[in-house]
Amino acid sequence: MRLGGSNLAAAVMAIGSAFTAAWWLNQLEGASPAQAAVPMVVQQDWPRDAGGGATQILRGPDGHWWADAMVDGRAVRLMVDTGATVVALTPEDAARLGLKLSAPDFSDEIRTAAGPARAARVRLASLSVGAVRVTDVDAVVVERGLPHSLLGMSWLGRLSGFEASADALTLRP
């Protein structure tokens, strides 16, 4: 088998995603029900309701894919993270979206790459990146420590597919 540049990038992403999933599953061993309250495995039976046409996101100078998204009609910049189970918002982005949360709302404990964090579950009416739109998206607002909001698998997993190349990420509704 021969690996060209785009195939190599896709293979590296697949391997990275597999290691991330294995790490998360390892972290769940022995987790209390409160810690496991936010699902760590993406459900495979979600409806595939993504609409619109294919959209490309160019890789940023920092090597990440940054999506300029519309969340419930408001602009939010999200870093694409295939290792994030759900869309994760910073408190600042949540406030800009009009989500009014108070301390008691942060009742779920989740595990992140940086360790445990408190989070509030929310549902986003719609999240669009370019022409790709998904409705009723599960998300969390992480109380502290999240440097930027993440476009996770609760959105990406509802697409018909996405494909990485050396320079771009293609999202297919």
Image: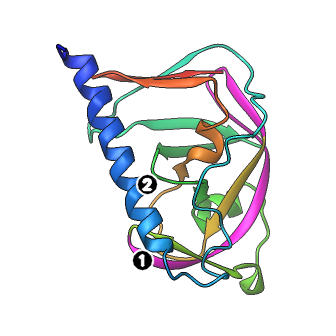
Scheme by which the image is coloured: rainbow
Dividing the image into 4 quarters, which one contains the N terminus?
top left
Dividing the image into 4 quarters, which one contains the C terminus?
top right
158 to 150, vertically: above or below = above
What element does badge 1 sit on? strand
In the rendered image, residue 115 lying in the magenta stretch gets the answer yes
Of circles 1 and 2, the one toward us is: 2
Magenta residues (range) = 114-135
Of label 1 and label 2, which has the lower sequence position?
2
Name the residue located 27 percent from the left edge and 18 percent from the top edge: 6
- On the image, the x and y values in percent for residue 159 come to 64, 28
116 to 62, vertically: above or below = below
**Quarter-wise, where is residue 120 in the image?**
bottom right
- On the image, the x and y values in percent for residue 78 come to 52, 45
Q: Amino acid at mark 2?
A: Ala
* 50 to the left or right of 130: right
Name the residue located 77 percent from the left edge and 39 percent from the top edge: 73
- On the image, the x and y values in percent for residue 96 come to 69, 57
Q: How would you rate the neighbour count of disc 1 (Cα within 10 Å): few for under 14, some for 14-19, many for 20 or more?
A: few
Name the residue located 72 percent from the left edge and 29 percent from the top edge: 133
What element does badge 2 sit on? helix
Q: Amino acid at mark 1?
A: Gly
**Quarter-wise, where is residue 17 in the image?**
top left
Residue that badge 2 annotates? 21
Residue that badge 1 annotates? 115
Compare residues 148 and 82 and report the one nearer the observer.
82
